[in-house]
Image (cartoon, grey):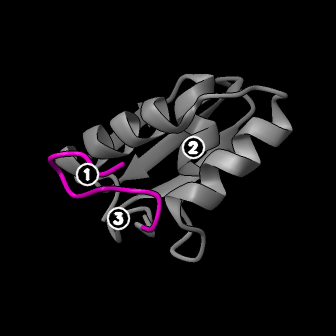
Amino acid sequence: MTHESGINRETVPKVGRNFRIQWEPAQDAYVLLYPEGMVKLNQSAGEILKRCDGAANVGDIVADLESTFNAQGLEGDVIRFIELAVQQKWVE
């Protein structure tokens, strides 16, 4: 399943070099830090982005999320989020 963006199960996403993801206890959420500020991520976004390590492909990320959260059918949502993250330059 390839989307217009070209992102598919074989794509290996990596958090962009100007960004860093970390758990922020004060926010009770994952945040994406960058030189100009910070983005507070919802739970789904945090779980996906923390797996964008430049080693796992989208298929691996989907399988890990489905296993971790006992869910099925997450591939479309994960790909759509990664497409958005690429547009925002959060992921390369």
**In the rendered image, the vertical position of residue 10 relative to residue 72, given as above or below:** below
Q: Is residue 42 left or right of residue 27?
A: left
Which class describes the residues within 10 Å of circle 2: few (<14), some (14-19), or many (20+)? Answer: some
Which class describes the residues within 10 Å of circle 1: few (<14), some (14-19), or many (20+)? Answer: some
The span shown in magenta is 1-10
**In the rendered image, the vertical position of residue 14 relative to residue 30, given as above or below:** below
Question: Residue drawn 43% across and 62% down?
Answer: 15
Dot 3 or dot 1: first in sequence order is: 3
Q: Is residue 45 left or right of residue 15?
A: right
Q: Which residue is mark 2?
A: 48
Q: Which residue is mark 1?
A: 86
Badge 1 amino acid: Val
Check residue 16 in the rendering and tell me which mark sits there, or answer none: 3
Dot 2 or dot 3: first in sequence order is: 3
* Numbered disc in front, either 2 or 3: 2
Question: Residue drawn 38% across and 36% down?
Answer: 81
Badge 2 amino acid: Ile
Front residue of 3/53: it is 3
* Residue 64 rendering spot, x and y as whole percentages: 75, 50
Front residue of 37/46: it is 46
